[in-house]
Amino acid sequence: MADRYPRLPPSGIKVLVVGAGFAGLAAAIECDRKGHSVTLLEKVDDIDEITAIGDIISFDPNGSKAFERWPGVVDAMEAIARQTKWLDLYHHEGKFVTRQSFAHETAWGRRINGHRGHLHRIMYDHAVARGIDIRLGLRVEDYFETDNPPQAGVVLSTGERLGADVVIAAEGVRSRGRKIVLGFDENPKSSGYAVYRAWYPAELIINNPVLRHLVADGDTHQGFIGPDIHFLASSIKNGTEVNWVFTHIDDGNIEESWQFPGKPEEALTYLPGWCPVVRELVKATPPGRLIDHKLVYRDPLPTFISPLARIALIGDSAHPFLPTSIQGASQSIEDGVVLAACLELSGRADVPRALRAFEKLRYGRVHRAQAQGPKTRERWHKADWAKVWANPELIHLPREPWLLNFDAEGDAYERYDEVVDVSKGEDKSKL
Ligand SMILES: Cc1cc2nc3c(=O)[nH]c(=O)nc-3n(C[C@H](O)[C@H](O)[C@H](O)COP(=O)(O)OP(=O)(O)OC[C@H]3O[C@@H](n4cnc5c(N)ncnc54)[C@H](O)[C@@H]3O)c2cc1C
């Protein structure tokens, strides 16, 4: 019987991936597809510790393209994703402004917006089903690389050292891999904003006359725009679950954690004069279902790869995104796709060439995508309402084909030769 998970013949390349978030899982699955030998290290003992957490996360067509190549994954994700092809935008006092349609994007691929934990679980289960060597409960403390023998590796908290041909550091915003790549330790900065995030059963609002329309008739998606705040709400799973998120100025009192609890009464203090739909959604949030999440940021790194080009940073380790870019998760998937393809093309004999190509293929694109986050935030938070009422499209999300209608694997195959030829390589300073 043919393998349910087709993969290229063994490349002989041994890959260590650190972190089983979306970036690490994507890299591990893609490396497995390309015939590389993968070991994935994750610090949590029980994957439920990270697959149960989170709320809404978005994958755009450029990210979900990879899911389509992993048998069964994209359909399983789509079945639990929000079934809307539009976003209704309102002024914060409640007046409807505009409906932005995403229907034309179907030709670009699938948009998957769903519960982060549930989508993560589908991806994790796929990695397990492929037989990838996943080792939980192993915390990486440090990284190393040597010329002779040519290798890279990690040091675990137990002191044990593990070696490989290449190490992929996908441990999120507090990455330890950044030290060997940058040559020094640095911490993420506050973006000046934090986000309240909530997810709860729709039965809590179905009898509320102000909110009933959000859940009575399947899934919905709306945004409310006000000074320095945008509030996004949706119903999902045929209107049976509800989530909302809103940014607020970070007053410095919260931690950078996806589990730091928030209080609805405190969230309401940021929303005086906001319309009843918004305030009622906040009030209806049950205890324990509100997270207050500090948004950290990092300036673009000068490089994503280590001096000997055997260790690569991917996902949030390399480039944390603001939520208004709606690309953090998709770009973390693209990273894994491109790195695995570059390793395929370089072969085991020239792993550093693969990493250099990976960086050249990714650097400009990632930072261009990242720059959209602050732009969209300003477009909403500092909206000139006289102009918006005259031209409501001014507050539409930018949905640009260069970003969304993009196949990272196809692009890597197409441009690899060009970028490994140093004379034709991209000049990062110009991007
Ligand atoms: C618990 C959690 C909940 C989140 N919820 C949301 C959400 O609701 N909405 C949203 O838009 N984004 C959410 N995110 C962020 C989002 O997943 C990322 O921005 C994006 O998907 C990029 O993922 P990543 O794999 O680069 O990083 P992450 O998702 O942060 O994954 C990093 C992984 O590395 C592991 N790790 C960290 N340090 C080590 C170490 N030293 N050794 C071994 N393993 C290590 C972590 O346990 C984690 O599994 C969440 C992230 C986390 C960790």
Image (tube, rainbow, N blue to C red):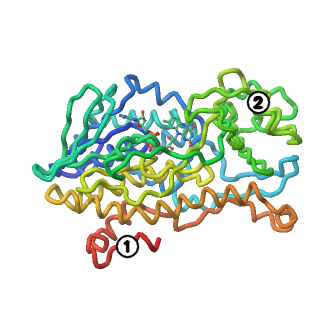
Q: Residue furthest bottom?
A: 423
Residue neighbourhood size for the residue with mark 1, other residues' Cα within 10 Å, grouped as few (<14), some (14–19), many (≥20): some
| Amino acid bearing label 2 | Glu
150 shown above or below 287:
below
Name the residue at 33% across, 27% down.
136
Residue neighbourhood size for the residue with mark 2, other residues' Cα within 10 Å, grouped as few (<14), some (14–19), many (≥20): few
Q: Position of residue 215 (x, y in %)?
A: 75, 35
Residue carrying label 1: 426
**SS label for mark 1:** loop
Q: Position of residue 81 (x, y in %)?
A: 58, 41
Q: Is residue 146 visible?
A: yes
Q: Position of residue 196 (x, y in %)?
A: 68, 36
The CA span between labels 2 and 1 is: 48 Å
Residue 370 quadrant: bottom right
Tell me whether circle 2 and circle 1 mark residues in contact (CB < 8 Å): no
Which one is earlier in the sequence, the residue at label 2 or at label 1? 2
Q: Nearer the viewer, residue 174 or 280?
A: 174
Q: Which mark is residue 266?
A: 2
The answer to whether the residue bearing label 2 lies less than 8 angstroms from the nearest atom of ligand 1 is no
Name the residue at 47% across, 30% down.
50
Name the residue at 29% across, 43% down.
5
398 shown above or below 191:
below
State which quarter of the image contains the N terminus. top left
Residue 204 quadrant: top right
| Amino acid bearing label 1 | Glu
Q: Is residue 25 visible?
A: no
